[in-house]
Amino acid sequence: MTTPTTFPDNFLWGGALAANQYEGAYDADGKGLSVQDVMPQGIVGPRTEAPTPDNLKLVGIDFYHRYKEDIALLAEMGFKVFRFSIAWSRIFPNGDETEPNEAGLAFYDRVLDELEKYGIEPLVTISHYETPLHLTKTYNGWADRRMIGFFERYARTLFERYGKRVKYWLTFNEINSVLHEPFMSGGINTPKEELSEQDLYQAIHHELVASASVTRIAHEVSPELQVGCMILAIPFYPLTPDPRDVWAAKQAERDNYTFGDVHVRGAYPGYFLRKLRDKGIELDITEADRRTLAEHTVDFVSFSYYMSSCETATQQREASGGNLMGGVVNPTLEVSQWGWAIDPRGLRTILNDYWDRWGKPLFIVENGLGARDELVTGPDGTPTVADDYRIDYMNDHLVQVREAIADGVQVIGYTSWGCIDCVSASTAQMSKRYGFIYVDRNDDGTGTLERYRKQSFGWYRDVIASNGASLKA
Ligand code: BG6
């Protein structure tokens, strides 16, 4: 038998977006505020008391009103799957109500109608960095155990309403990012520098229990539903072969592994319990929590992958740039315009590591290159972007996915990040673009919001149509 050189027949090709970064319409039809509405500069600047006009996310790319046109473009590329998040505060504007907002629910019915029209499978993130602001201000977000109940009610509402049309669900986007961004990721209002590790780890515990609990609810609503966790994946390499550096890299990876270990194996790993002991942290974990974690593990593991990093315990630390977290600079790799290390092989490493460790089907739900694009006039007179750098990045990563599949790893699909240009999560810029589709909007908020196909649009359409055969090894 020869090694397979192509993707499985039912491989789910597509793209991903998140409500707060592309929907806009931040207060339409009864929507409440979310943490994003007071983060005009993402994680790199101060929060505001109330939404301010410089916050590009308030309008986003106005998908709320342009979803038909946008989904038609995704269909033109041949998308098999579209990953998007539901804005929690459209469904429960404050987060702690007992009845949902019908107008918010109806919007996602319309989106699902449109996806169904083209046979595109939805992949829904239940919580993608958009905790209702009221939950943050009133309960301090996930630091409070009552959040579990609010999240259960929200998730049950979604499963009951959309469960017949949406098979694949993700609980928390990049759940491990709460370690570094407690406000954006965990809705925790206490400033990061004042937040105790005791409170941070307790919040993490609440999220993990909530994730397991809604996995139970999904399976109760329909055994057909498939629920996955979502992890921000970064392979950490030892900066040198010194065993102390090897151990430092392992520790950095374990900070992230913990989240998958609990979701897949249903209990906290020993190395994590030791870390808590060493830090003097005692978590409030009930017997019911333990049972929930143990009995309701995930059906699959999903992750984002943009970059790898290095760790060292022996050398001078030169901090690397990175996706909400990072270690030290890897001198062998080039970086993006935003300083993220470009490492296609790291994706094969992660796929193999996760598969070896957890043996669960894997779904790559984010990957891509954030770059400054220049709009030019194409051969047929229409505006376009000659984004060969993006094509190279994605081609090289997908070749490594193909290698991992040949290694025996089970991969369900691939949704590239920001398939239509949207507002960046970390810097809140429009100019950090990931899409196959250019959106005419600038960092100062000007622009027509018109959509234009980039060169990568046709390239990705060919990749999908050939099920990966057009990739260049
Ligand atoms: C991930 C997030 O961290 O990376 C997305 O899940 C985000 O929301 C993506 O947009 C890319 O990061 P950024 O900061 O370049 O938008």
Image: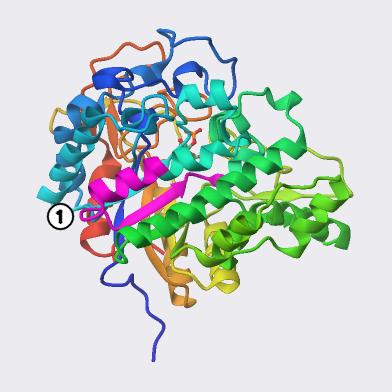
Q: Is residue 444 left or right of residue 160?
A: right
* 345 shown above or below 1: above
Residue span colored magenta: 153-175
Q: Which residue is mark 1?
A: 119
Q: In the rendered view, tell whether residue 103 sits above or below residue 468.
A: above
Query: Which quarter shows the C terminus?
Result: bottom left
User: Percent from the top left, x then y, of residue 250?
Assistant: 75, 59
Q: Quadrant of the N terminus?
A: bottom left
Query: Residue type at mark 1?
Result: Gly
Residue 226 visible here: yes
In this picture, residue 436 sits left or right of residue 70? right
Q: Camera-side residue: 27 or 254?
A: 27
Question: Residue at horizontal 36%, vertical 62%?
Answer: 219
Query: What is the crowding at mark 1: few (fewer than 14 residues within 10 Å), some, or many (at least 20)?
Result: some
Q: Is residue 129 above or below residue 209?
A: above
At a point 39% along the width and 42% down the height, the residue shown is 153
Q: Is residue 40 among what the camera can see?
A: no
Scheme of colours in the image: rainbow
Residue 331 shown left or right of residue 18 in the figure: right
x and y, in percent, of residue 397 in the image: 46, 56
Q: Which quadrant of the figure has residue 445?
A: top left
Q: Nearer the viewer, residue 165 or 329?
A: 165
Task: Look at the numbered disc 1 and give the secondary structure of its residue.
Answer: loop
* Disc 1 CB within 8 Å of nearest ligand 1 atom: no
In the foreground, 228 or 307: 228
| Rendered location of residue 62, percent (x, y) | 26, 23
In-front residue for pair 64/465: 64
**Residue 164 shown in magenta:** yes
Q: Residue extending furthest bottom?
A: 1
Return the x and y of residue 10 as percentages of the image width and height: 26, 69
